[in-house]
Amino acid sequence: MNKFSEKFHIFKIKRLLRGIFNPDKKFIEKSRAIFLKAFKEKPAYVTNSPVARNYYKFKIAFVSVLVLLLLAVTSFVYADVKNVGPNHPLYPLKRLSEGIQLELASSKNKAQLNDIFAKRRLEEVKELKENSGQNQKNENEIMKLKNDFVNEVENEEKITKNSQNKILDLCEMSKEIDGSHPSAQWVGFQKHCQNIKNKINNKKENNGNSSKNGDNENGGNYNRTKSAHTVPMNHFRDAGD
């Protein structure tokens, strides 16, 4: 009896488990329909609550703006660090980055940035001449870059005192660009370079003449002083004896 009752209980348990883990087809179809209906419908907090809807929209907008801002900053940094050329898609971002740097920099740093950006403009002109064909668009771009170079040099000269040597270095670098695409601003800059060079040469000549005249005058004064105050050597010998 014990064995029979034990088997009977095992049979009932198996039947019960079979009913749980193997539901009938009607139950499966009904449950499937309920699940799909609930899945397709939006949650109540999204459809019915204005606060929840606004929060959801704000969250999406905030993430989108954050991603765009990150992409913009990355593009700014890349364009400036890589010093992209005028034909690069990120070149406008590079020029915009330069303007921001100048606005945020101190007076001393502005002069250094003007010097760096002036040299960049010369490199960009060379790149356009080497890699671009001869057409009106390129000629206009080259002329614009030359004028931008002149503006950078003028701004550096305004900020930095006694900067003639630095300006003259930029003048010498500008000679590497041929005389095509001249503008009134470019021609005026070349004349300004020549004036700086003439001033430096005249200053050197005047300093040389002044030093010569000073040596002659000092020599004459020394001779007169020596003749007036020279004491014969035998005078000290007599005093010593």
Image (cartoon, helix red, strand yellow):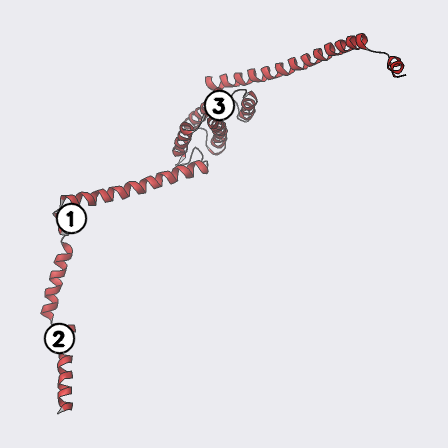
* Vertical position of residue 95 compared to residue 233: above or below: below
Task: Point out the tag, 1 or 2, that comes first from the N-terminus.
Answer: 2
Give the residue type at disc 1. Answer: Val
Q: Nearer the viewer, residue 162 or 77?
A: 162
**170 displayed left or right of 106:** right
Task: Point out the tag, 1 or 3, that comes first from the N-terminus.
Answer: 1
Label 3: element kind: helix
Give the residue type at disc 3. Answer: Glu
Q: Name the residue that disc number 1 marks.
A: 46
Quarter of the rendering occupied by the C terminus = top right
Q: Nearer the viewer, residue 119 or 106?
A: 106
Q: Name the residue that disc number 2 marks.
A: 19
Q: Name the residue that disc number 3 marks.
A: 156
Label 1, label 3: how many angstroms apart (C-alpha)?
A: 59 Å
Label 2: element kind: helix
* Vertical position of residue 229 compared to residue 164: above or below: above
Q: Position of residue 240 (x, y in %)?
A: 88, 17
